[in-house]
Amino acid sequence: MLAAKKKPAAKKTPAKKKAAPKAKKAAAKAKKAPAKKAPARKAKGPSEKTLKELHLKMVRIRRFEESAGKMMEDGKIPGALHLYVGQEAVAAGVMQHLSNQDWITSTHRGHGHLVAKGGEFKPMFAELFGRATGYCKGKGGSMHISSMDLGMLGANGIVGGGPPIAMGAAFSNKFRRNKNVAVAFFGDGASNEGSVHEAANMAALYKLPCIFVCENNGYGEYTAQSRHQAIVDVADRAAGYGMPGVICDGMDVMAVYEAAGEAIERARKGGGPTLLECKTYRYYDHVGVRGMGLNYRTDEEIEAWKKKDAIEGFEKRLKQLGVMTEKQIKTVHAAVEKDVDEAIEFANESPYPEADTLLDNVYNEKGA
């Protein structure tokens, strides 16, 4: 057996010197005087300006989508529209932290992302109408709308097509040593795609400034999540990639704002990617308003989610906090409605693309 280690002998402390009379008096006063408390620090929260901007973003998305959906149903907009109504809190909460120098990739349900990123109604409606004044000169349409000036790398008709592009943009940011981030939006259905797994794996490996935002609205087109995944939370997969997985209430814009803010700040500081899952819901069908008439959701389920409406809930909170009055809120809605009407008129009056511009911006010509 090893011998027990001996404790070192205690050191003798030198005898205390008697305090001088003046020092004694000062010490006595110090004992009587109450200790000063450090001023309490107020928790930093979003400013009133930020709260109003979040509200405006959501209202703009809702009004744009409802108008676009109605025109599609009336046959005034060609093709299929995948509407974002119900999910406004996700786009608004995330985009509030981004600048035009930050990149995003979208999905086939991409109008809301572009509106929240700063997209203007006139070129957006013009694009849906297939007019030359649209963001993509009428060639992108609904599912491929984009704006490089705003950092919107494009909506995407390919399920799971966005994350690899966002990962590449994030790699570019890291290579250039700037503080910009890339955000990839995708749904619960797309989270099963190999492209998403590959992008997440590489982003984690190289600690890229990329945030993977899964907008889990409970359905992959017409298939309930429980019928295409054995898991309940997509964020559980983050551990396999080697990145944090965070779940938030996608019907609460402040919950998204806070969770996204932490993930984006972490990415800017070199901490690498995050998988952020936002539990949300789309009010309308997979395509358009009425869709194909498939009965895969109950009316009771839809109404239950509408009771959690992100805009209505946030407006109640704004009034309780004294940030906005009912009159101010109605003024915002009216102003946005006016913008929508003017944008539709602009799109209707805009010309169609000329035939000789068909290949413009499609192929890169040498020396151009």
Image (cartoon, grey):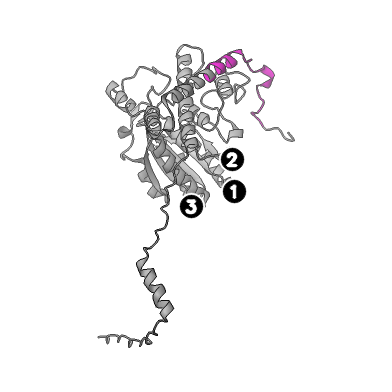
- Of labels 3 and 2, earlier in sequence is 2
Mark 2, Cα crowd under 10 Å, few <14 / some 14-19 / many 20+, is: some
Residue 202 in view of the camera: no
Amino acid tagged 2: Gln
165 and 347: which one is in front?
347
Amino acid tagged 3: Gly
- Mark 2 and mark 1: Cα distance apart in space: 10 Å
Res 293 quadrant in image: top left
Relative to 1, 186 lies left or right: right
Q: Position of residue 29 (x, y in %)?
A: 38, 70
Mark 3, Cα crowd under 10 Å, few <14 / some 14-19 / many 20+, is: some
User: In this rendering, is residue 142 above or below 24?
Assistant: above
**Image disc number at residue 101:** 2
- Mark 3 and mark 2: Cα distance apart in space: 19 Å
Total tally of numbered discs in the picture: 3
Relative to 8, 95 lies left or right: right
Residue 348 in view of the camera: yes
293 and 209: which one is in front?
209
Relative to 236, 329 lies left or right: right
Residue under label 1: 178
Q: Position of residue 209 (x, y in %)?
A: 52, 47
Residue under label 3: 271
Mark 2 touching mark 1, by CB under 8 A?
Answer: yes
Amino acid tagged 1: Asn
Mark 1 touching mark 3, by CB under 8 A?
Answer: no
- Of labels 1 and 3, earlier in sequence is 1
Q: Residue at x 39, y 58 (%)?
A: 37
User: In this rendering, is residue 171 above or below 31?
Assistant: above
Over which residues does the magenta segment extend?
339-363
358 part of magenta stretch: yes
